[in-house]
Amino acid sequence: MSDQRQEFEDENTANFDDLQDQDLQNNEDDQGKLQKELDELKDKYMRANAEFENIKKRMEKEKLNAMAYANESFAKDLLDVLDALEAALNVQCHDEISLKIKEGVQNTLDLFLKKLEKHGVSVIEEENEFNPNLHEAMFHVESKDHQSGAVVQVLQKGYKISDRVIRPTKVSVAK
């Protein structure tokens, strides 16, 4: 009976060892699956975080642009007033009252330009060479004094806010 008992114990020990090996193998498989799942979740997290940072940067840039160019349409509307004031300065004055009025218009124009500059609106500087980003060619003229493509005359001043043109300078260009 002791032989049977020994065989029984040996068989149980073998079965127990097999079960332990099987459990160990299952644990390693589970651990591998969990590690793979963890790696996938880390990857998803990193991608989501990067996307969030990109959106955050884009929104910040859009916010800055919105602030910088918020007054653009208002400034465009005021350009007609500037043109009218400049036209009033070109009127010939012969009496003292007209000269005083012209001086008042000049002071108003100067103050108006300072206030616009305070809010980022500035006159586009005159250039001798035609630049399609800053100028609008109204017509071409023959000119012996200018090279082809040169600005001959400024017909209407152009303006910009920061680096964005809100009205191009209207010019005549040499052929």
Image (cartoon, helix red, strand yellow):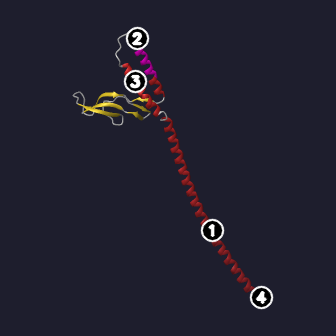
Q: CA distance from mark 1 to mark 4?
A: 41 Å
* 10 Å crowding of disc 1: few (<14), some (14-19), many (20+): few
Where is residue 99 shown, x and y percent of the image? 39, 13
Among the 4 quarters of the image, the one containing residue 121? top left
Sequence-earlier tag: 1 or 4: 4
- Residue 125 at what x, y percent from top left? 37, 29
Q: Residues within 10 Å of mark 3 (few under 14, many from 20)?
A: few
Mark closest to the chain's N terminus, 1 or 3: 1
Left or right: 58 in relation to 101: right
The disc, 2 or 3, on the residue closer to the chain's N-terminal end is: 3
Q: Is residue 33 above or below residue 48?
A: below
- Looking at the image, residue 80 sits to the left or right of residue 129; the answer is right
Q: Looking at the image, which residue is at 73% across and 85% down? A: 8
Q: Residue at x 65, y 72 (%)?
A: 24
Amino acid residing under circle 2: Ile
Looking at the image, do the residues carrying marks 2 and 3 touch, with CB atoms under 8 Å apart? Answer: no
Q: What residue is shown with label 2?
A: 97
| Alpha-carbon span between mark 2 and mark 3 | 19 Å
Does residue 120 belong to the magenta stretch?
Answer: no
Q: Identify which residue, 50 or 140, lies in the foreground.
A: 140
Identify the element where label 2 is drawn: helix
Residue identified by numbered label 1? 30
Does the residue at mark 4 contact the one at mark 3 (Cβ under 8 Å)? no
Badge 3 marks a residue whose secondary structure is helix
**On the rendered image, what quadrant is the C terminus found in?**
top left
Decide whether residue 102 is among the magenta residues: yes
Asked whether, in this view, residue 94 is left or right of residue 41, the answer is: left
Q: Which residues are magenta?
A: 100-111
Residue tagged 4: 2
Q: Residue at x 57, y 55 (%)?
A: 45
Q: Is residue 172 above or below residue 14?
A: above
User: What's the residue type where badge 3 is placed?
Assistant: Ala
